[in-house]
Amino acid sequence: MQKKKKHGIAYIRSTLSNTIITVTDYKGDTKTWSSSGSLGFKGSRRSTNYAAQATAENAARTAIQLGIKSIEVEIKGLGYGKESSLRGLRLGGLIITKIRDVTPTPHNGCRPPKKRRV
């Protein structure tokens, strides 16, 4: 009997001030999470590429300890840490099978304010 490899989903939320990574199983139960702030980065250093990579490596290491070998990645946001967090997940030892960008984009945006009367 062959042991089945564990597969999970990594959700990367990259904002302009922080990077949050959550690793779940296929049912959606959170297995581990990590953020730039929880690793000790404060202030403007939280939004850097290095902080995002360190966050991803930390999340990948704890996911591997829980038995997760490969992941699908969903990226949301427009922060600086999108590319480097993917690099950090690979450096942490996880195999990435699928990358999906789910950043919400407005179709036409909000209605503009009224024109100014002169």
Image (cartoon, helix red, strand yellow):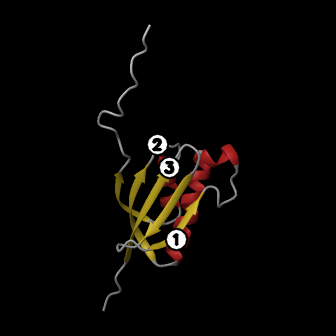
Callout 3 amino acid: Ser
The amino acid on which the numbered mark 1 sits, given as a three-letter code, is Thr
Residue in front for this viewpoint, 57 or 48: 48
Seen from the viewer's position, the closer of residues 45 and 1 is 45
Q: Which SS class for mark 3?
A: strand
Residue 82: x and y in percent read 48, 48
Mark 2 and mark 1 lie on one chain; the one further toward the N terminus is 1
- Where residue 57 sits: x, y (%)? 56, 61
Residue at position x 33%, y 38% from top? 106
Q: Taking 38 as reference, is 63 above or below it?
A: below
Q: In this view, does 96 lie to the left or right of 60?
A: left
Picture quarter with the C terminus: top left
Q: Residue at x 37, y 78 (%)?
A: 5
Instruction: Pick whichever, 1 or 68, lies toward us.
Output: 68
Q: As shown in the figure, which amino acid type bears the numbered disc 2? A: Leu
Q: Mark 1 points at which residue?
A: 32
Q: How crowded is mark 3: few (under 14 residues within 10 Å), some or many (20 or more)?
A: many
Cα distance between the residues tagged 2 and 1? 23 Å
Residue 71 is labelled as none
Q: What SS does tag 1 mark?
A: strand
Residue found at x 39% / y 17%: 115
Q: Nearer the viewer, residue 2 or 80?
A: 80
Q: Name the residue under label 3.
A: 14
Secondary structure state at the residue bearing disc 2: loop
